[in-house]
Image (tube, helix red, strand yellow):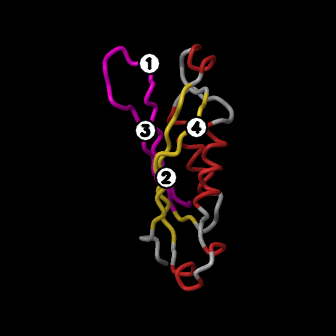
Amino acid sequence: MDTTDRITLTGVRAFGYHGVYPDEKREGQEFVVDAALSLSLRRAAETDDVVDTVHYGELAERLVAVVEGEPVDLIETLAQRLADAALDDVRVDAVTITVHKPQAPIAVPFGDVAVTITRGRA
């Protein structure tokens, strides 16, 4: 199995209502998602057919739907939901998801806050 192959999608932006504080759930904010899928791309390379790979446009739409979906308190929980959405495709062996929260309620200047998780098939 060629699980060293990867499809990487970075900087997917979506508006969601996730956070611990009431104003985060009320006003919402932008989240940025990076996804790196580990899977075999051998068949897709041989056939040159999009049906033999994970369509990254469709993946981006699924990720946006999760971010725009049911609010959660923690971006850790959001990252898990995003990983689950990527692993819904049986061709994906593992996924690394990073959720960036650039407008996090932090009282000091900062560039970014993010959570990264890696999940694979059991």
| Amino acid residing under circle 3 | Val
Disc nearer the start of the sequence (2/1): 2
Q: Nearer the viewer, mark 1 or mark 4?
A: 4
Which mark identifies residue 14? 4
Q: Which residues are magenta?
A: 94-122
Tell me the CA gap for discs 3 and 4: 16 Å
| Amino acid residing under circle 2 | Ala
Q: Are marks 3 and 4 in contact (CB under 8 Å)?
A: no
Tell me the CA gap for discs 2 and 4: 14 Å
In the displayed structure image, the side of residue 42 where residue 90 appears, left or right: right
| Amino acid residing under circle 4 | Ala
Q: Nearer the viewer, mark 2 or mark 3?
A: 2
Disc nearer the start of the sequence (1/4): 4
**Residue under label 2:** 35
Q: Nearer the viewer, mark 3 or mark 4?
A: 4
Element at label 3: strand
**Residue under label 1:** 105
Tell me the CA gap for discs 1 and 3: 15 Å
x then y, percent, for residue 85 = 63, 51
Q: Is residue 103 magenta?
A: yes
Residue 68 drawn above or below residue 95: above
Tell me the CA gap for discs 1 and 4: 18 Å
**Residue under label 3:** 115
x then y, percent, for residue 7 = 48, 63
Give the residue at the far bottom of this rendering.
46
